[in-house]
Amino acid sequence: MIRISNLTLARGTRRLFDNANLTLFPGHKVGLVGANGIGKSTLFALMRGEIHQDSGELEMPPSWVIAHVAQHTPQSALSALEYTLDGDRELRALEAALAEAEATEWHDHLTSAEHEKLAAELSHLHTRFEEIGGYAARSRAASLLSGLGFNEEQQEQAVSTFSGGWRMRLNLAQALMCRSDLLLLDEPTNHLDLDAVMWIEDWLAQYRGTLFLITHDRDFLDAVVNQVVHVENLKLNQYTGNYSTFERTRAMQLANQQAQHAKQQRQVQHLKSYIDRFKAKATKAKQAQSRIKTLERMEMIAAAHVDSPFEFSFRKPVAAPRQLLHLKEAELGYDSKTVLPHVEWRLFYGDKIGLLGPNGAGKSTLVKTLAGTLAQKKGGRYEGQGLKIGYFAQHQIEQLRTDESALMHFKRLDPTTREQEFRNFLGGFDFRGSRVEEPVGPFSGGEKARLALALIVWQRPNLLLLDEPTNHLDIDMREALAEALQEFEGTLVVVAHDRHLLKATADQLWLVAEGEVKEFDGDLDDYKQWAKQYATAKAKGFKDYRDAKVEAGRADSAKNAPKAPLVLELGSVSPAARKEQKRMEADARQRLAAARKPLEKKLAELDSKLKALTAEKANIETWLSDESAYTDEKKPQLQEMLKRQGEVAGAIGDVEWEWLATSEKLVGIV
């Protein structure tokens, strides 16, 4: 268990924690939330032993293996696969020890006693290597890389050939490769696409160690954690349940706090009124002094604050043409590569579109082409009259002038507007006071992203293109962006791994895959199933997902088709041969039935087990959705329910995998 007691910690002159306390139990999955810059990453650095507290205690099991995502990737010639394998330090140490021992074994100068000792050492090393899954390690590493979006060719590429975002994925793969007791993940989804986010979500659901997670993705938190630690007022406030449960519980606490604050303020006003009226009167002086002391002893209840620091909206676009943009028979891609060979797409005013698709399928290529920053290779582009594009992508942040202030960026954009209007507008993005005059260079990633968004919003676009806009944004800013986009009157095309943003803003989902852009018939849960099927098809070697569907259809047809009767040419087969053939066919049927029977029995048992677990999961979720579950008297039962919820989720995953493996074995028996 991890125990933090009376922790006080400051960075420079700023105090981050003051007498903070926290207890984390083994196997729990905990989300760490709070505003940017409040000390979450600093707490992780403390747990990794990189910094020390000013006072208080941090107790952790000394034998625990801690894994975290490195922030820097060396310029390494190692392949992506080998780099990932380095994450399992014991595996690498055993490999080195085995190589050394096996090389020594062949030396002629060893005595028989030395040979015997070396043989025992080799036996021990091989046993331990097998215990930690060493023989399956490469397969495990390849599976991790595949889930994070690396194809087979990329897995063999040198680390130094990858861009910054892909190197961060490699660091994440290395952290997941470690067989850790404690996994510290700080914004793991920032450099991932939606497919990879959904994959790691499933992976973490199966993780058996203790997870401590920092992320601003509320859907990701809901799916993964069973506890939330909220950093606020220099304290670590612990809540049971996922993020949605935390929000409900905290809202109730704040409402109660506000009611208590209002009640206390009425009492304070009454006491002050009495003191003001009677403190000068000799007959009432003692009573007035008594009330003054009562006021001094009173512990003030702070007013509850839940207001977001962000409040902005998109101004109405100047022009509203019915058809904003039409790509006609367009071929999209780059000089040496065609990504989307034939795109026929019309964008109408008011469309709200979320783009889905596997990594590398062409989502960003499509958005860049719509924005006009990437020229079409072929085909027509027809723009509506008055088209005004607002385009947000990572490179927009990198193009900010680091030596200029936020205010100067706006003055350069619109020299005729009064400075106070800019200040009022920037306040909605939480740039206030002298902050608007400071150079952009030292700003955090989140602040730069907010400024880039603010510049786009100011220009009143009627076509808004957003490529992963939520990277580096905290939960409050993401919520403010979602609310503003809901009111945006123009056309929106968004690529995002944040499902909450997609659900809140997109009326249509379009799929970019296999060189096509087409409307997706389903929701994000359906897309998750599609993505799994697509990944499976690719893993089986299908170059085109549609080939996999055709193959699956053929397999189903063949399985369900009636068996053709065996036709024998009676004149050419003797009665004895016919009798022997029938005996052999009967033996074959018996062997087939004998081979299938235990697998069919096991499948039936797994089906029954899965049904029971699913029913239990539904009952637990129903219980947890009831507000009465979070009262003080039900606290022990709540803790037990949350613990059981995690156990059931893990058991369902195990049963599903076992069912798939058994089903594949059964299909293979023909």
Image: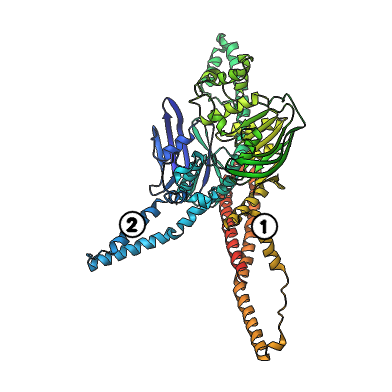
Q: Is label 1 or label 2 in front?
A: 1
Gap between marks 1 and 2 measured at Cα: 47 Å
Tell me which residue sits at (66%, 61%) in the image: 551
Q: Residue furthest right?
A: 322
Tell me which residue sits at (42%, 51%) in the image: 88
Q: Amino acid at mark 2?
A: Ala
Q: Quadrant of the C terminus?
A: bottom right
- In the rendering, at what x and y percent does residue 466 appear? 63, 34
**Would you call the spot at circle 1 few (<14 residues within 10 Å), some (14-19), or many (20 or more)?**
some
- In the rendering, at what x and y percent does residue 668 appear? 60, 68
Q: Which residue is mark 1?
A: 549
Q: Nearer the viewer, residue 317 or 383?
A: 383
Determine whether, in the image, residue 167 is placed left or right of residue 552.
left
Asked if one can make out residue 52 in the rendered structure from this viewpoint, the answer is yes
Q: Amino acid at mark 1?
A: Lys
Tag shown at residue 648: none
Tell me which residue sits at (50%, 31%) in the image: 38
Locate residue 215: give its quadrant.
Answer: top right
- In the rendering, at what x and y percent does residue 307 appear? 62, 27
